[in-house]
Image (spheres, rainbow, N blue to C red):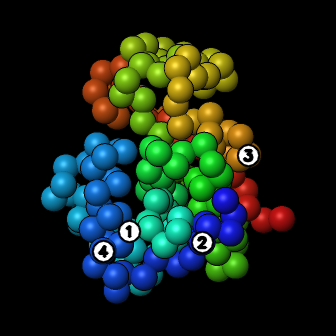
Amino acid sequence: MSERLHIGTFPLSSRADRERAAALLVAELFYDPRDAVDEVEEACAEDRLCFAAHLDGYLVGWIAGNAGYDGRVWELHPLVVAKETQRQGIGTALVRALEDAAHAKGGITIWLGTDDEQGQTTLAGVDIYPNLPAHLATVKAVRPHPMTFYQRLGYTVIGVIPDANGIGKPDILLGKRIVR
């Protein structure tokens, strides 16, 4: 498949790619269609990093990153890959492209949030405030959750925002040092 897959910077000049990128957000990450169009434009602004994955010339995924802390820390948001092409290394290739580009710009760390709105981790449905450190030390996925994908790529749970999406629905924060 590697010959058919191309990872490159995401040019916003292609209307078809912008529309496909927004459609991926709606289909895979459940964005409102109006919000998805805005997210694509914002995520791929000139001051950000944005990469696209094309399989046989067709957009099947994309990723963006935004710098903070004077360029030392980058937020990965969003990453989306079409369901029919998941588990083929496309997400991994996109994350690696973002890591390499952020590192080339002086980045030291990448962080991201993975919401648990569907009870996919041990933090869901639990009041984690009384003993937050213990909950963080033992967090794991109980059903498929993006956290495990990122952990396979070397990301570590670095925090949580309890109740970010409602009572018992946290946002789990992961990070990785990208200095080699």
List the residue tagged with mark 4. 16
In the displayed orientation, state which residue is furthest to the left: 34
List the residue tagged with mark 2. 6
Between 128 and 9, the one lying in front of the other is 9
Left or right of 12? Residue 7 is right
Query: Which tag, 4 or 3, sits closer to the chain's start?
Result: 4
List the residue tagged with mark 1. 43
| Res. 16 visible in picture | yes
Residue drawn at point x = 71 percent, y = 40 percent: 152
Number of numbered discs overlaid on the protein picture: 4
Query: Which tag, 4 or 2, sits closer to the chain's start?
Result: 2
Mark 1 and mark 2: span between their CA atoms?
Answer: 20 Å
Amino acid tagged 1:
Ala
* Res. 171 mark: none
Mark 4 and mark 2: span between their CA atoms?
Answer: 17 Å
Res. 174 image quadrant: top right
Amino acid tagged 4:
Ala
Amino acid tagged 2:
His
List the residue tagged with mark 3. 154
Q: Where does the image place residue 70, in percent across and percent down from the top left? A: 56, 75
Location of residue 80 with respect to 51 vertically, above or below:
above
Q: Residues within 10 Å of mark 3 (few under 14, many from 20)?
A: few
Mark 1 and mark 4: span between their CA atoms?
Answer: 17 Å
Q: Where does the image place residue 142, in percent across and percent down from the top left? A: 55, 17
Residue drawn at point x = 34 percent, y = 86 percent: 13
Assign a secondary structure to mark 1: helix
Left or right of 108? Residue 174 is left
Q: Quadrant of the N terminus?
A: bottom right
